[in-house]
Structure formats: structure tokens, C-alpha cells
Amino acid sequence: MALINPLYLSGFISFGAAVVLSASAAMASPVSHRVVYDLDMHNVSSAAQVETIDGQTHYSVRKLCDGWETIEDYAISFGFGPDGQSNFISHYQTWESFAGDAFTFNVTENSTLDGDKQYDGFANIAQGAGEAYYSVGEPTTRELPDNTMLPMKHMLMLLDRARNGERVYQSNLFLGGDQDGSLYFVNSVMGKRKNIPADEKIGSLAEDGYWPITIAYYDPEAVNPEPEYEITFRVQDNGVIRSYIVKYSDFSMRATLRSAEEIDAPSC
């Protein structure tokens, strides 16, 4: 089972999920910040093996002198009823250039099912196509197809298009990590802005409203019409994600904001 950043994120996502200043003058720069989310089960079907979810993720996005740094640390326990539980810990760190044409990633994972894993590499994109390099184990490369985007630029483009009244956008998205699970075809749906005030947990980072954005992630080579998973974000214009839901085929996981704080960016 893959767990992806919400600002992709990104994310901003992973999950997390950011703004590329050189990509468009209309895009506003996100605030460098750190957030903590509590994770639990949102919905579950009778066919699901997973019965409970309990965890937390710490996510930060920071504007450096030459690009954006994102760091996300997960600790999640999946309960399987009488069959016990599985624990999953991961560290996901990326750097992405402001132009959205260069990217590095470092991922370490530990789980009771799969043991220790590590993924490192980088990607370069020129005029929508590019190449990714994976440096762990036997070094390998893969071509990235036309209309491939990197996480920060992708999320910020979605916000920019949402502000302009656009509702649907499709592209390829490179996230890094495992070679077999680092590239997706994504279909994004941007809802109308919700003018709902933030709660006190966001503090000085609070804005009056947010954009509901849902991204469906597809294996670019699969024939199955169903996505591998979907993430629905509630993201403010300053890049802070109030909450998100990750939906798999037979259950969904909810991330609820516990705390948020602005962090200092370097003096360049």
C-alpha cells in the first residue's frame, strides 16, 4: 500500500503539498510552515482487511534560496482485528527548483510487513518531458513522458487554475520514491472556494477560506479505469492544508490538523 505526500502533498503533498514564483506572476508564494496531522479511519467497507488506523504525520514546506524543501514523517498503525496490526514509519524529503524543472528525493521506510527500504534519486524536466534517476541499488533511469510535472509546481498550478474558475486538469506527476510507484497519471478536480473560517489550531496562518481539490492517481500503464487512490485536500491560498482524506478501494484515511506554525526561511 502506498502512502503519498498531501501537498502532494505533498506532498504539498506529501501530503502535502506550494507555489512556483517563476512559473507565473499570478501565483502567490506559500508561507514556509510546519503542520502536524492526526490520522484515523474515515470510512471502511465490509471487504476491507484494515479495521483501524491510528497515526500521525509531521509535514513542513520551506522556501530555500534555490527552491522548495518539503519533509514529511509518518508513523501509522493499521489494525487487522484478530490478525494483529502492522506498523509503518516513513521519512520523505524532497527539494524542487522554483521553476519546477529539477527535483531530488530521499525516502526511507520501515514496516512490520516489508522491513526497511530506501529510495534516493533526482529528476530533470525540460519542456514537459524529462528523465528520472534512481541511485539506490543498481542505478537506473527512466524517461518521463510529455506533460510531466513535479509536486510543488503541480499543486500551485491547480490553485492558480482554481482561482481562474477552471475545474479539471490532467497531467503526469512525478513524486519520487520506488521506481515502480513514482510516476502517476493524475486527474485533478478543483471545486469552488469555500469561505469557511479556519479554526484556532491554524493560528496566524489562518485564512478565511479554502479550495477543495481532489486528485485521483492512476498507474500510467494500467488498464484498470479505477484510480489506485484519491486524495481530497482543503488547501488555503497560502499553501496550508486544513485537512485531507486519502481514499483507497475499500477504506479511506482521514488527516485532521493538530497544530500549525510558521517557520523561518533563510536569508538569501
Image (cartoon, rainbow, N blue to C red):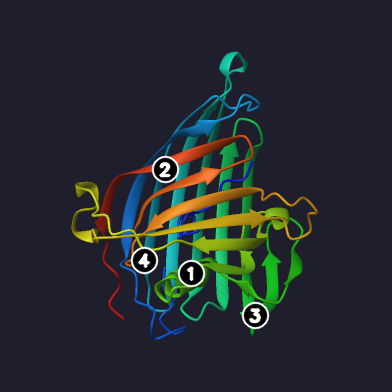
Mark nearer the N terminus (1 vs 2): 1
**Mark 1 and mark 2 residues within 8 Å of each other at the beta carbon:** no
Q: Secondary structure at mark 2?
A: strand
Q: The disc labelled 1 sits on which kind of residue?
A: Leu
* Quadrant in which the C terminus appears: bottom left
Cα distance in 3D space between marks 3 and 1: 16 Å
- Residue 123: x and y in percent read 63, 71
Indicate which label's residue lies in the foreground, 3 or 4. Answer: 3
Mark nearer the N terminus (1 vs 4): 4
Number of numbered markers: 4
Indicate which label's residue lies in the foreground, 4 or 2. Answer: 2
Q: Secondary structure at mark 3?
A: loop
The residue at 26%/66% (across/down) is 264
Q: The disc labelled 4 sits on which kind of residue?
A: Arg
Instruction: Identify residue for label 2.
Output: 255
Indicate which label's residue lies in the foreground, 3 or 1. Answer: 1
> Can residue 51 be seen from the camera position used here?
yes
- Residue 62: x and y in percent read 36, 66
Residue 62 badge:
4
Residue 158 badge:
1
Indicate which label's residue lies in the foreground, 1 or 2. Answer: 1
Residue 128 badge:
3
**Mark 3 and mark 4 residues within 8 Å of each other at the beta carbon:** no
Q: The disc labelled 3 sits on which kind of residue?
A: Gly
Q: Secondary structure at mark 1?
A: helix
